Amino acid sequence: MKVIPKGINELTDQVKSLCIKHEKWGKVFELTFSDTIKNALVEDEHGIFVLTGDIPAMWQRDSTAQVRPYLIAAKNDPETANLLKKVLQRQFFNMSLDPYANAFNQTANHKGHQDDQTKMGPWIWKRKYEIDSLCYPINLAYLYWKNTDDTSIFNNEFIAATHKAVNTLKVEQNHVDSPYTFERFVDRPEDTLINHGRGGDVGYTGMTWCGFRPSDDACVYNYSIPENMFAHGVLLQLAQIYQKVLRDSDFAAKCSILANEIWNGIQKYGVMTDQSGNKIFAFEVDGLGHKLFMDDANVPDLISLPYLGLIAADDPLYQNKYYYEGKYAKGIGSPHTPAGYIWPIALAMEGLTNSDKKYKEQILDTLVATTGDTNMMHEGFDPNDPTKFTRPWFSWANMMFCELVLDYFDLMVEK
C-alpha cells in the first residue's frame, strides 16, 4: 500500500507540531509512522498481509504491534479503521490455517522454513508455537472494538479462528496429549525443541504450554509466565466479546474458566524469591520446581506486563531487570541477538511502562541518537557503537518508537 489514510496523516501532523522542542523525534516519527503503510502492507483477497520488515513473512505478533498505534487515528477516521479491519481479516485467516504457526506466507508458495520437522504447509513460513501468536490478534480485535465501537469484525471467520485458539490453549494445558512437535537440525540449540521435538518435561500447573519465546527462541522451561499472563488477559477480553457482542454465554464461560485456571497456575507456580528475599514473577517455570530468573527484550516479557494491561506497574511482583550498559545506552537485550546488544523495543517498553515524563524523554532521546544514522529503529544495537546493529528494517521496532512518542504527548490507545 502507498496511500496513507487521512487520519494517519492528520495524526502525524499533530505529533510533528508537538515536537517543536524535539525536532529529531518528529523527523524519526514521520519516517517510521508512515513506513509500515508505505512498505509493509500488501492487500489481497484475504485482507492485508503485513510484512515484518526485511523478512518476507507476516508474524501474528509483529503485525499487531505494527498497526496498534493506528488505533488512535481509527477512532475518528473510517479509512484507518478499514485498514485495521483488513489486517484483522488476514490474521484470523492465518490463525484458521494453523493455530500452532507463528509466521505465514502471503500465498501458498512453500517459502520459509519448509525443512523444519513439524507439520509445515505451503502457507506457513515458520511453525514455532508461541502463545502470543494466538493472543495478539484477539487483543487487537478487542482494542479495535473498544476504540471504534465497530463489531463487524466479530464474524464467522473470527468465531472459527478464536474457537481454534481457545481449543489449542486448552489442549496445551496437558502437553503430553498435544499433537505438536518441532525440530530444526542446526547448530543453534535455541532453534529447536529437545526430547524429540516435544520440549522439556513439565508438570501440570493449569497454565498453558509454550514452545518458543516471542524472540522465536526455544523456552528453557515451557510455562512462560509473561505468555501465560497475556493469555489470561486476552481470554477475559474474548469472554467479553462472546458475552456482550456474540451472545454466546457458553463459550464466554469456557474462556473465563480457562483464564482462571491459568491465573491460579501463575500464582501457584510462577512466583519466586530473589536474592533479597522479595517475591517476584519468574520468567519461565516447568511445574516441577525449576524457575528461570531473567527477562527478554521481546513482547510479551515481564517488563511489558503493565503495557499490555495485565498488571499494575506498582505491583510488588513486577520487576524490571537484566540490562546491558554501554557508552550510548543501557537496556534489555536478548539471546536472539549478539551478546551486549540492546533492543529499541525494550527501551520503548521501559518508557511506556514508566509514568515519569522526564524518563520517557530520556528514552526517546536515546532511541533517536542510536539509529546508526538511519533514522529508523533496529532489532538490536551495540550500545558502544550504534552503527553496529541487526535488521536495518524492523517495522515492529519502528512502531514501538512511534507509540512511545504518542504516549509522551498523551495520545494513547484506549484499553
Image (spheres, helix red, strand yellow):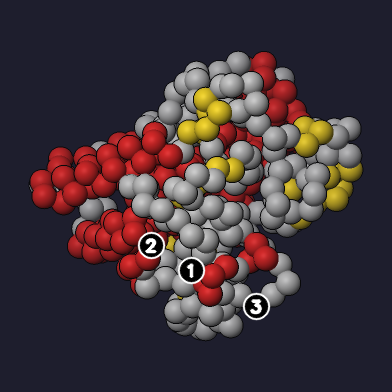
Q: Nearer the viewer, residue 149 or 276?
A: 276
Q: Nearer the viewer, residue 34 or 141?
A: 141
Residue 115, percent from left and from top: 58, 83
Q: Seen in the image, is 194 located left or right of residue 310? A: right
Residue 162 image-quadrant placement: bottom left
Quadrant that contains the C terminus: top left
The tag earlier along the polypeptide, 3 or 1, is 3
Question: Label 3: which residue?
Answer: 185
The tag earlier along the polypeptide, 1 or 2, is 2
Q: Residue at x 43, y 28 (%)?
A: 311
Kindly indicate whether the residue at mark 2 contacts the one at mark 1 (C-beta within 8 angstroms): yes
**Numbered circles on residues, count:** 3
- Badge 1 element: loop
| In this rendering, the label closer to the viewer, 2 or 3 | 2
Mark 1 Cα shell of 10 Å, populated few (<14), some (14-19), many (≥20): some
The tag earlier along the polypeptide, 2 or 3, is 2
Q: CA distance from mark 2 to mark 3?
A: 22 Å
Q: Residue at x 79, y 53 (%)?
A: 338
